[in-house]
Amino acid sequence: MPVTGLPPYDEGNIFARILRGEIPCRKVFENEHALAFHDINPQAPIHVLVIPKAPFVSAADFHAGADDATIAGFWRAVGQVARDLGLEPKGYRLLANMGHDGGQEVPHFHVHLFGGRPIGRMVPGA
Ligand code: 5GP
């Protein structure tokens, strides 16, 4: 059972459909734990999404409910994607939106990886 206060996992969400191969994506990395692909509406020259293959809605949900190998595999994949995209030397931003206030559009836990230019202020209007 999810331990999040967010809605339960929806198997019909767009990232679940990408994971099942029902919708195409521009893949940059895949292993048993994670899939990374270009965002369909990029907000920076490089905008890649890294998603765990396991079905969780939020960070709280994922880190409480996934096993250690899944959690480690996901975060290792995030690091590998950043390296593979050549982002380490100049830097980049990782961001994860959660729920309504976080502006989460797709209810499958994921991180955004932004790079290719200075990304600017952390929170707009702050
Ligand atoms: P969220 O607001 O949930 O953190 O971000 C979801 C992201 O998924 C958005 O940046 C949006 O552009 C991206 N997205 C939504 N649908 C698709 C899709 O079908 N394919 C890809 N590649 N990205 C998508």
Image (cartoon, rainbow, N blue to C red):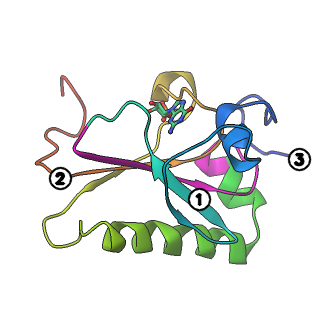
Q: Is residue 111 magenta?
A: no
Foreground of the two, 26 or 2: 26
- Disc 1 Cβ-to-ligand 1 distance below 8 Å: no
Q: Amino acid at mark 1?
A: Leu
Q: Amino acid at mark 3?
A: Met
Which residue is rendered at x = 23% and y = 57% of the image?
A: 92
The residue carrying mark 2 is 116
Q: Which label number is shown at residue 101? A: none
State how far apart marks 3 and 1 are (Cα).
23 Å
Q: Amino acid at mark 2?
A: Gly
First reached walking from the N terminus: tag 2 or tag 3:
3
- Which is closer to the viewer, label 2 or label 3? 2
- Which is closer to the viewer, label 3 or label 1? 1
The residue carrying mark 3 is 1
Which residue is rendered at x = 77% and y = 58% of the image?
A: 65
Q: Position of residue 103 (x, y in %)?
A: 47, 25
State how far apart marks 1 and 2 are (Cα).
21 Å
In the rendered structure, the answer to whether residue 81 lies left or right of residue 7 reads left
